[in-house]
Amino acid sequence: MNKETHVLDRPPEGAAADWTIPQDWAAYTAEEHATWDRLFARQAKLLPGRASSAYLKGLEALRLSESGIPNFEELSERLHKLTGWQVVAVPGLVPDAVFFDHMANRRFVAGNFIRRPDQLDYIQEPDVFHDVFGHVPMLADPVFADYLAAYGRGGMRALELGALKQLGRLYWYTVEFGLVEEAEGLRIYGSGIVSSSAESVFALDSDSPNRIRFDMQRVMRTEYRIDDFQQNYFVIPSFEALLRETVETDFAPLYAEILAQPDIPIAAILPEDDVITHGTQAYAEGKAAS
Ligand code: PHE
Ligand code: FE
């Protein structure tokens, strides 16, 4: 789930007051389960040596390798024992306050539909593969689990302070598209990367994107794209460091400072950036030219 997609203003028919709907696991067809299995097999082959150890551990602990689309009730039971989180189904689009409230209360909202077989490589709206395979393994990590719950509380505050766009960028460049520096090298942990076969490779191996050491203010000022591979990845030193910095910082004065400054264009490198890879941007420029 990402922040671009929460737009309706009251729960649609069949949804509860908190916007949740039954997953209706029994209604999935054999073809839909097979789509999950195909996506799963492809990522399972790619991710060792690429995904962060926290992600790979979560995948194991939650037994997501069992065949078929996971049943949210069973998955929630396993996850709840580990970190207190649960997975609940919502009809795709929920308002920001609803999204943050679930998150602050350790309920991860997931779409229950799965992409069609002709959409294996790309979908605009987050489906159950993105939401569950992409996001849920990280929620089995106690530190990341705390980060996302804290983020939910921070979201409520950002709504009041008129800084949703700025906080949303933090989500984008960590939860959705983050990299982490491990002893063996850079690893992916962002859900948008680990659930995409092409971006799992691109994010680590391509010469095109910038890879910059994470700086919270910098990230909250940086534009991003939702329609193609990222042009910037931000690299955290560890999940502990990310949690500590976000929880210990009062964002109110930070927002005031950031809102008074210009946004940073998508692929710009600043003199103060701690750059790991200065990307060629050849991929994005090639696309723009064609
Ligand atoms: N500490 C932030 C605030 O004061 C909240 C926050 C926590 C934001 C964790 C993101 C992640 O608003
Ligand atoms: Fe997402």
Image (cartoon, helix red, strand yellow):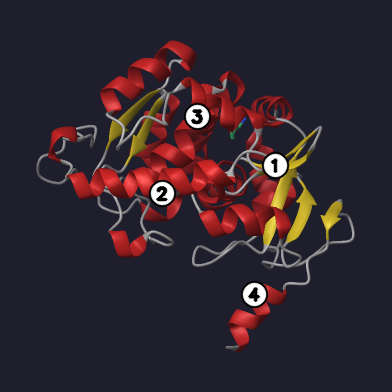
Reply above or below: 57 against 26.
above
From the image, which quarter does the C terminus lie in?
bottom right
Give the mark nearest the N terminus, 4 or 2: 2
Give the mark nearest the N terminus, 1 or 3: 3
Give the mark nearest the N terminus, 2 or 3: 2
Give the residue number, with chain letter if any, for mark 4: 284
Q: Which mark is residue 59?
A: 3
Which one is nearer the viewer's eye here, 64 or 282?
64
Q: CA distance from mark 2 to mark 3?
A: 14 Å
Q: Position of 19 compared to 128: left or right?
A: left
Bin the neighbour count of mark 3 within 10 Å (Cα to Cα): few under 14, some 14-19, many 20 and up: many
Judge whether residue 16 can be spotted in this image: no
Q: Secondary structure at mark 1?
A: strand
Give the mark nearest the N terminus, 2 or 1: 2
| Image quarter of residue 28 | top left
Give the mark nearest the N terminus, 1 or 4: 1
